[in-house]
């Protein structure tokens, strides 16, 4: 690596970027950055300009001489980069509104990374991440790709399986939040606890032991019912059934509520759909407030309001991962990476989310072992749903997409599910060139988006 690190961030106009800057500033002494390139697309140009100026002010308020570059030229940003971080959202928040509202119109869960919405986010995102990888092969072949773009596990799987790029680590803030909030519940310090995570992104479980090695997961389960449980802001807090957690002797991640308490989560989502709007509509308001703050020429630090977004503490994962690779720190981090036997219930070559030691060679997984029948069954269904979704995203094959919809536990199979899928194809046509033939056929058949809000969003150019 050259003296002074070059970092390229794809999706640099995101409201999360100040969080990323804060993490880099905190670690500058071990991660001597020279320049950071923030990249976005034409539709995000205004936000990119605002957030890049904010990022430069954050660095200018430190003793460190780091230059921020804002560009729409991805190749310029990637050239000779040491690390590439990805945090982009294809179609921006309007696309997420459609992912949420169209399934909700038909009485099913629409969510950013789960169910029908999560699959369509993958359909839009996978081709873009693969094009980034192709650019990296030419412009920065020794760089590491640190992915936070959702659905993070599927995106990382696509990079490994179809991009044939192993220098990649997928990240999520959900395990970080668990490890930040749970020690206090237990009256312990984080450094005195031993965590083991296993599963998939937004579908993992974890165990915890004390510093003597004694498993204290049962104690943690008890505390989850009388303390703040560290849920991300974007998940409705309906408690898990305690008896279920006691039986599995593991703590599910917050997103498991969509599967273990689907009835209640769906009822809450539909109530929001009918009243205050879906999560994406709420986030649009929060994001508008954030960018108004970011415009302030005197603001040179991350504002507290950023905690309202669902990705709080993202920088603690992303920046620590980069620092660990650069300094060969062998830090224990929860990552999405190739399984290599850590979870024997899944193929060795697929991507899982597990505890790993991260150093100069990437992630070295901590073996978790086989799961019990219930968790094993869930995991295998979800992984195969992911693989079908990614295959459909790459090939543009309608039948494969329908197979992914059919196997997804949050999509009730049948005519309505097919209708939801068809409407989502129409709604996102601008961002799904691989499905162009399918979309043309559906338009000729007269398929139209029924949800009024989704239909009226002007992001789609027909």
Image (cartoon, rainbow, N blue to C red):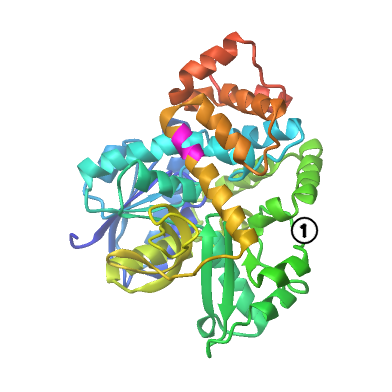
Q: Does the magenta stretch include residue 310?
A: no
Q: Left or right of 403: which side holds 77?
A: left
Q: Residue furthest bottom?
A: 212
Q: Residue at x 52, y 67 (%)?
A: 197
The residue at the point 43 percent across, 43 percent down is 11
Q: Where is residue 27 in the image (x, y as percent from the top left)?
A: 38, 69
Foreground pick, 66 / 98? 98
- At x 43%, y 38%, the residue is 126
Q: Quadrant of residue 247?
A: bottom right
In the foreground, 11 or 155: 155
In the rendered image, the vertical position of residue 297 relative to residue 373, given as above or below: above
Q: Tell me the SS state at disc 1.
A: loop
Q: Quadrant of the C terminus?
A: top right
Relative image position of residue 351 (x, y in whole percent): 43, 53
Dominant SS of magenta comes to: helix
**Mark 1 crowd level (few <14, some 14–19, many ≥20, 10 Å Cα):** few
Residue for point 53% across, 90% down: 212
Image spot of residue 213 (x, y percent): 53, 87
Residue occupied by mark 1: 238
**Can you say which quadrant of the picture contains the N terminus?**
bottom left
Classify 389 as above or below 20: above
Examine the rendering and report whether any part of residue 236 can be seen: yes
Residue bounds of the magenta highlight: 388-392
């Amino acid at each position: 690596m050259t003296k002074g690190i070059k970092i390229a961030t794809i999706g640099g106009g995101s409201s999360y970027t100040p969080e990323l800057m804060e993490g880099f500033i905190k670690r500058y002494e071990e991660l001597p950055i020279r320049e950071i390139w923030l990249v976005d697309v034409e539709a995000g140009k205004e936000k990119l300009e605002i957030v890049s100026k904010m990022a430069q002010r954050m660095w200018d308020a430190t003793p460190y001489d780091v230059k921020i570059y804002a560009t729409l030229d991805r190749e310029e940003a990637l050239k000779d980069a040491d690390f590439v971080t990805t945090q982009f959202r294809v179609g921006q928040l309007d696309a997420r509104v459609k992912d949420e509202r169209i399934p909700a119109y038909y009485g099913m869960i629409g969510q950013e990374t789960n169910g029908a919405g999560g699959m369509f986010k993958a359909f839009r995102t996978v081709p873009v991440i693969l094009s980034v990888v192709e650019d990296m092969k030419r412009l920065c072949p020794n760089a590491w790709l640190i992915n936070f773009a959702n659905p993070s596990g599927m995106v990382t799987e696509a990079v490994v399986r179809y991009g044939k790029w192993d220098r990649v680590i997928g990240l999520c803030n959900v395990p970080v939040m668990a490890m930040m909030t749970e020690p206090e519940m237990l009256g312990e310090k984080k450094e005195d606890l031993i965590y083991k995570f296993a599963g998939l992104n937004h579908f993992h479980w974890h165990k915890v032991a004390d510093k003597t090695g004694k498993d204290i997961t049962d104690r943690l389960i008890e505390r989850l019912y009388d303390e703040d449980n560290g849920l991300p802001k974007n998940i409705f807090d309906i408690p898990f059934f305690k008896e279920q957690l006691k039986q599995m002797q593991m703590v599910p991640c917050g997103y498991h509520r969509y599967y273990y308490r689907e009835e209640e989560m769906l009822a809450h989502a539909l109530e929001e759909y009918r009243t205050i709007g879906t999560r994406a509509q709420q986030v649009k308001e929060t994001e508008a407030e954030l960018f108004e703050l970011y415009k302030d020429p005197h603001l040179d630090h991350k504002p507290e309001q950023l905690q309202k977004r669902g990705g709080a503490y993202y920088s603690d994962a992303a920046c620590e991962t980069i620092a660990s690779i650069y300094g060969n720190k062998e830090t224990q981090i929860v990552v999405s990476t190739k399984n290599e036997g850590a979870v024997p219930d899944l193929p060795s070559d697929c991507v899982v989310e597990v505890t790993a030691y991260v150093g100069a060679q990437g992630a070295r997984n901590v073996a978790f072992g086989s799961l019990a029948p219930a968790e094993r069954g869930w995991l295998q269904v979800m992984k195969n749903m992911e693989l079908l979704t990614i295959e459909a995203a790459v090939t543009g094959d309608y039948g494969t997409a329908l197979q992914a919809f059919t196997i997804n536990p949050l999509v009730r199979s049948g005519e309505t599910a097919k209708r939801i899928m068809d409407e989502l194809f129409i709604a996102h046509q601008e961002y799904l060139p691989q499905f162009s033939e399918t979309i043309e056929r559906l338009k000729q058949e007269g398929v139209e988006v029924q949800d009024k809000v989704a239909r009226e969003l002007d992001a789609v150019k027909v």
